[in-house]
Amino acid sequence: MNGQMIYEDQHFLDHMCLEVPVQIYCGRRHSDIGFIEYYGKEFVQVNNIFYNRKQFTFVSRPGY
């Protein structure tokens, strides 16, 4: 769903497999947007940058 926060492993897997873009925020500040290339327990890789899952917020952006 557009604008839905993603935080569970299954959310990240679904977005990576289905190539649904995510928007990344640090607090209220926009940091990046792109496709998930990798995810793990602590980090998510988007645009060759690793984002800490505890520090950043990930938002679903289908159709962006």
Image: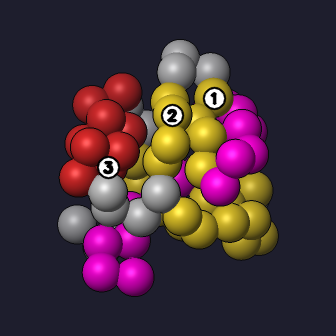
Q: Are marks 2 and 1 in contact (CB under 8 Å)?
A: yes
Circle nearer the viewer, 2 or 3: 2
Q: Is residue 52 magenta?
A: yes
Q: Say whether residue 37 is magenta.
A: no
Q: Secondary structure at mark 3?
A: helix
Between disc 2 and disc 3, whose residue precedes?
Answer: 3
Q: Residue at x 38, y 71 (%)?
A: 61
| Numbered label attached to residue 20 | none
Q: Which dot, 2 or 1, sits closer to the camera?
A: 2
Q: Is residue 26 above or below residue 6?
A: below
User: Between residues 51 and 5, which one lies in front from this camera angle?
Assistant: 51
Q: Upstream in the sequence, badge 2 or badge 1? A: 2
Closer to the chain start, of discs 1 and 3, is 3
Estimate how packed mark 3 is, as few (under 14), some (14 to 19) or many (20 or more) residues with alpha carbons within 10 Å.
some
Question: What numbered label is drawn on residue 15?
Answer: 3
- Neighbor class of circle 1 (other Cα within 10 Å; few <14, some 14-19, many 20+) is some
Where does the image place residue 10, in percent across and percent down from the top left?
27, 31
What's under tag 3, amino acid-wise? His
Mark 1 in CB contact with mark 3 (< 8 angstroms) = no
**As drawn, is 64 to the left or to the right of 51?**
left
Identity, as a three-letter code, of the amino acid under mark 2: Tyr
Q: Say left or right for 53 vs 26.
A: left
Q: Residues within 10 Å of mark 2 (few under 14, many from 20)?
A: some
Q: Quadrant of the N terminus?
A: bottom left
Q: Check disc 1 and report the residue beneath it.
A: 43
SS of the residue under disc 1:
strand
Q: Estimate the spatial distance between the alpha carbons at disc 2 and disc 1, rounded to whole Å.
A: 8 Å
Instruction: Specify start and end residues of the magenta stretch as a single range.
Output: 47-64
Residue on which the image places disc 2: 38
Label 2 element class: strand
- Identify whether 30 is placed above or below 24: below
